[in-house]
Amino acid sequence: MKKLTFFFVVALLYAITSCKNQDFSNNIPAVEQTQFTKPPKNLRDYRYGEVIPIFQNSTTIYIEVYNTIGLNELPAEQWEKLNAEELAESYGAKMVRLNGPRYWVLNSMRGSGKTVNGKTVDFEGIEMTLRATLEFKIWDGSALEEHYSDNEVNRETIWMYHKGNMVYELTNPDGEIYRMQSYSQEIDPTLSIRDLEKLQERLQLPKGWSYHFRILEENSELNSNGKAYVITDDLNNTYQKINAH
């Protein structure tokens, strides 16, 4: 993974002020779930959002990914009021990423383990559930904010794409293929699923990368097997590696 300027700053902060080992798993308190929104059977183009707090434990970066799926459809008025800096200060995080609004391009999903049973928290009236975590050393850097670079995400999910639906894929110079799981309106608030067939014209692809789309001739599943390898493009659309083992 490539290193990021932010994480160089974190490393410098660590050199100046040594951090004691801490357990950040309880920094964001759990609440009893009160919001229940049953997702449609077909999730394609279904709205959701994420809050991603980033903590530092000595030389380790620990990241939690909270998601609205099954709780609400990311109410716009409340989402726009969230302040990442204030949330980071409240929870003792190095920073907080507000990831959304997003829309699924898969059709359905299955989860197991902590992906299903993660704690529910309340972000200023928007309830979310802990769905995934990431962890790495500060000298390893992270692709969390760097496009076209792998994030190793701990989650137990199966993404299902149905026959007859369009899929959108990136191929890297090594022939590894990443399939889009969701598109983002974070950078371009007007982006819609209808625009995805024209992304090739907008993306600043690294040398040797290509973008293509096709209609599935049969049902297809992407199983994370406990670890998913996820990348983002220039518009923060997310893709999961197909041929990861």
Image (cartoon, rainbow, N blue to C red):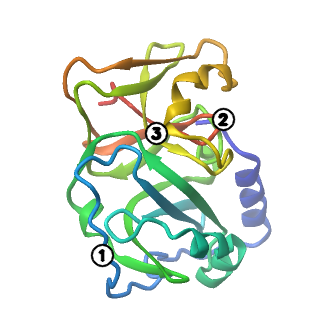
Point out the frontmost of discs 1 and 3.
1
Residue 193 seen by the camera: yes
The CA span between labels 2 and 1 is 33 Å
Label located before the other in sequence (1 or 3): 1
- Secondary structure under tag 2 reads loop
Under tag 3, what secondary structure? strand
For the point 56% across and 60% down, the residue is 60
Q: Which residue is mark 1?
A: 36
* Occupied quadrant, residue 124: bottom right
Which amino acid does the dot numbered 1 rest on? Phe
- Provide residue 152's location: percent of width, then percent of height: 44, 44
Is residue 63 at all visible to an observer of this figure? no
**Residue 44 quadrant:** top left
Of the numbered discs 2 and 1, the one sitting upstream in the chain is: 1
Q: CA distance from mark 1 to mark 3?
A: 28 Å
Q: Amino acid at mark 3?
A: Val
In the rendering, which numbered label is found on residue 230?
3
x and y percent of residue 215 in the render?
Answer: 33, 19
2 or 3: mark nearer the eye? 2
Q: Which residue is mark 2?
A: 234
